[in-house]
Amino acid sequence: QMYVATGVNVANCPINLSTGALSCGGAAGGLSQAKKVRIHNTASGLFAYLIASNGINACPISTTNGYPGTCQVTNSGLTVPVAGQSTTTANWYPNAIDFFTAGNSSTYAYVIESHTSGGIFKCNVNNTTGLLSACAAVTPAGMPANYGIYGLTNIKIFSIGSSTYAYMALASQGVVKCSVDATTGALSSCAASNGGIGNGVWYTNSIAFSNLGGATTYAYVSDINLSAIYVC
């Protein structure tokens, strides 16, 4: 199944396995500016994590029909900007989220946010309730100077063999790759990974991976300036 952030909710779209066509139905609604969704499997089942104007919403997914259930706001005590308030009263404005389960069975969430100059938050994830806690800003070594100014737009955690990496879309600066510690989930050794494309040539917005059933893994990077997808 595919889950789509529609601007006001997250829609459940079963996929026809023969044609690939979508048939979208039930949704978790009542959310403003729903812009991204990520699915994560916990000990108590699947959750859809929806990024909206109120921050991050954890929505349990029904095992019967795949529909998202009642969502809970899970901002770990942090606040998002509210119309009419000074932005100094807010802590973050999430753009994207992804997850990593470490060798000690602890699960961490990595949140890309764009409040003020932008940044990266690392959170603990309750494996029963799916809720976030202890979210704290991190500054991994090797990130490009002034990376918050360029605009972090997305993050994808991906494992290659025994190693795990965080890939972050950094607007006009392309893609940044960081190592993820197998035990602590800490990010380190960050560096640009643009596949030969120079800074300013593209404006990356998201990244996904697939090996298409073979030995070679491909990265698919969307560019919102050219309305194009790069295959790396």
Image (cartoon, helix red, strand yellow):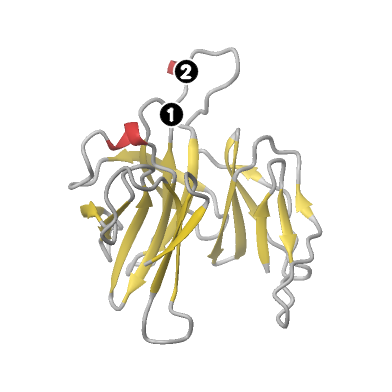
Q: CA distance from mark 1 to mark 2?
A: 8 Å
Quadrant location, the C terminus: bottom left
| Residue 95 relative to residue 159: left or right | right
Q: Are marks 1 and 2 in contact (CB under 8 Å)?
A: yes
* Disc 2 residue crowd, few under 14, some 14–19, many 20+, Cα 10 Å: some
The residue at which mark 1 appears reads as: 115
Residue 108 in which image quadrant: bottom left
How far across and down, in percent of the image, does residue 151 sit? Answer: 39, 37
* Residue at x-position 43% and y-position 45%: 111
Residue 55 in which image quadrant: top right
Tally of numbered tags: 2
Kind of element beneath mark 2: helix
Between 218 and 10, the one lying in front of the other is 218
How far across and down, in percent of the image, does residue 47 sit? Answer: 61, 59
How far across and down, in percent of the image, does residue 105 sit? Answer: 39, 67
* Residue at x-position 26% and y-position 53%: 187
Q: Amino acid at mark 1?
A: His
The residue at which mark 2 appears reads as: 87
* Residue at x-position 60% and y-position 18%: 83
- The image shows residue 71, relative to residue 156, as above or below, that is above
Kind of element beneath mark 1: loop
* Residue at x-position 42% and y-position 58%: 156
- The image shows residue 211, relative to residue 25, as above or below, that is below
| Residue 232 relative to residue 140: left or right | right
Q: Amino acid at mark 2?
A: Thr
How far across and down, in percent of the image, does residue 117 sit? Answer: 35, 28
Task: Evaluate whether residue 68 shows in this view.
Answer: no
